[in-house]
Image (spheres, grey):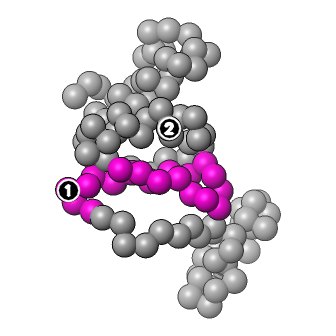
Amino acid sequence: PRAPICSVSDLPVDIQAREYREHIQLEEIRGYNADIVCLQEVTGSVLELWRPILAGAQLQGVRSTESGELAVFWRESRFQVVAETTWLIRDLLGDAENVDICAALFSAPDLKAYFE
């Protein structure tokens, strides 16, 4: 596999070239050969473009219906879908089993405000 791209200077073209960035991101994801890949800020157009390519690498995926920009891909030979749901952290903070997380957030007001 190729060496990971670690900085903007590693790119051979202008970072503003969206199509090129999407191509590089896709190659980076495939190069990890991961069984599970979790992504943020995945638009519908990118997902639809990538889905058949990643399927060729035995990765199936879904995008969150709640947030719309979270996606999870998994290797078909290792995992299968049993159920599908989305949890947003801000919705889980009131649960009793998350008291420790809430205490940490209260000690960092900037984080607490982010999840409210």
Q: Which residue is mark 2?
A: 48
For the magenta stretch, what is the residue range?
60-79
Comparing 58 with 18, the one in front is 58
Instruction: Indicate the position of residue 27 as horizontal and vertical percent values.
Output: 35, 28
Q: Are marks 1 and 2 in contact (CB under 8 Å)?
A: no
Instruction: Indicate the position of residue 97 as horizontal and vertical percent values.
Output: 56, 88
Comparing 46 with 21, the one in front is 46
Q: In the visual, does 31 lie left or right of 28?
A: left
Instruction: Indicate the position of residue 86 as horizontal and vertical percent values.
Output: 56, 67
Mark 1 crowd level (few <14, some 14–19, many ≥20, 10 Å Cα): few
> Considering only order in the chain, which callout, 2 or 1, is on the residue closer to the N terminus?
2
| Quadrant of residue 74 within the rendered picture | bottom left
Q: Any magenta on residue 41?
A: no
Q: Any magenta on residue 75?
A: yes
Q: In the visual, does 9 lie left or right of 91?
A: left
Q: Looking at the image, which residue is at 47% across and 54% down? A: 62
User: What label sits on residue 77 in the rendered view?
Assistant: 1
Q: Can I make out residue 87 in this image?
A: yes
- Which quarter of the rendered picture does the N terminus lie within? top left
Give the vertical position of 49 relative to 39 (above or below): above
**Tag 2's secondary structure?**
helix
| Quadrant of residue 113 within the rendered picture | bottom right
Q: Looking at the image, which residue is at 63% across and 68% down? A: 89
Comparing 99 with 46, the one in front is 46
Mark 1 and mark 2: Cα distance apart in space: 22 Å
